[in-house]
Image: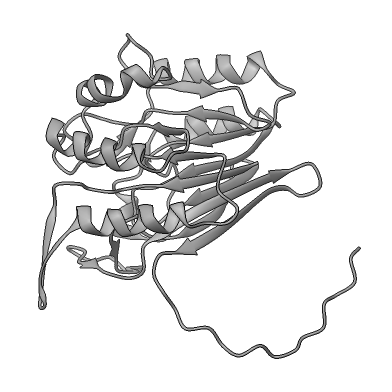
Amino acid sequence: MLIAQITDFHVGRIIKTDNGPIDLFDRLKQTVEHLTNLNPQPDLVVVSGDISNHGNIEDYERAKRLLDSIGLPYFVMPGNHDSRESLRMLFQADGYLPSSGEFLQYTIEQYPLRLIMLDTLEVGQHHGMICDKRLDWLNNKLTESPERPTLIFMHHPPAKLNLPYQDNMRCFNGKKLAEIVADHNQIHGVACGHTHRDSVANWAKTVLFVTPSATFSYGLEMKPVDDITPRFEPACIRLFHWGSDTGLVSHLSFVGSYPNGLTEGVPTPAAN
């Protein structure tokens, strides 16, 4: 089973650079093209929040048309820039978002690896929150299927990542979440976005994966700063491979064309 995670599109934002303005929707189109050329193709795509920069319905319409063009099953969830109402309006017909309730949390059950989607949106704030109601929902879902290997997706990282500016915008109440995650041995990882950088950490007896943006990055600021500046490092797609012989394995696929080196004639290792 192969899962592609793409995150933090910020459709509707235009970033000024020394070489002129860059429309992030154009960057997203490059990422989607890269995704459609992956071989093998993923079984599904997870879109882990911040689809729109302002929550405008027009931005979601553009993003949905592009996501539909991939031709693969995909699943969306909210980030801090998103509107739950707009997400419901545009993606409800796809059949996986809850039709009612305060939060957009749900499970995906039809694959060998069970996926749980958490809603960390705190309206009007850049940081995230997972309140007791959302935590109780998660605990109940995990208790239902203790034998099912599970991967959790959420927008905000629930732990500090040695990125002081970004750490102030993590998912608050992460310690309570960690207690629940640590109590359930079937969880093989927790995957997030939000920081626009790649990070991997040991957390709550599992692995925390933080995936870079599909459109732009922020600088690697490991000391306190007053602000962070957008950068156009290569956009990324995170891939999760799940197999009976490997467990969960993750790779980053960088968007763009890069020169190949010459073949060095390294002998093929014997299979183990």
Q: Is residue 107 above or below residue 4?
A: above
Q: In the image, residue 218 lies at what x, y percent?
A: 28, 64
Q: In the image, residue 187 lies at what x, y percent?
A: 64, 34
The quarter in which the C terminus is drawn is: bottom right
Q: Can residue 201 be seen by looking at this rendering?
A: yes
For residue 79, side relative to residue 148 (left or right): left
| Residue nearest the viewer, comparing 13 with 34 | 34
The quarter in which the N terminus is drawn is: top right
Q: In the image, residue 253 lies at what x, y percent?
A: 49, 62
| Number of numbered discs overlaid on the protein picture | 0
| Residue nearest the viewer, comparing 42 with 135 | 42
Q: Quadrant of residue 235?
A: bottom left
Q: In the image, residue 31 lies at what x, y percent?
A: 36, 57
Report the residue at 60% width, 90% height from top: 262
For residue 179, side relative to residue 54 (left or right): right
For residue 76, side relative to residue 185 (left or right): left
Q: Is residue 10 above or below residue 256?
A: above
Report the residue at 30% width, 69% height from top: 219
Q: Can residue 161 be seen by looking at this rendering?
A: no
Colour scheme shown: one colour
Q: Quadrant of residue 255?
A: bottom left
Report the residue at 48% width, 16% height from top: 137
Report the residue at 60% width, 53% height from top: 40
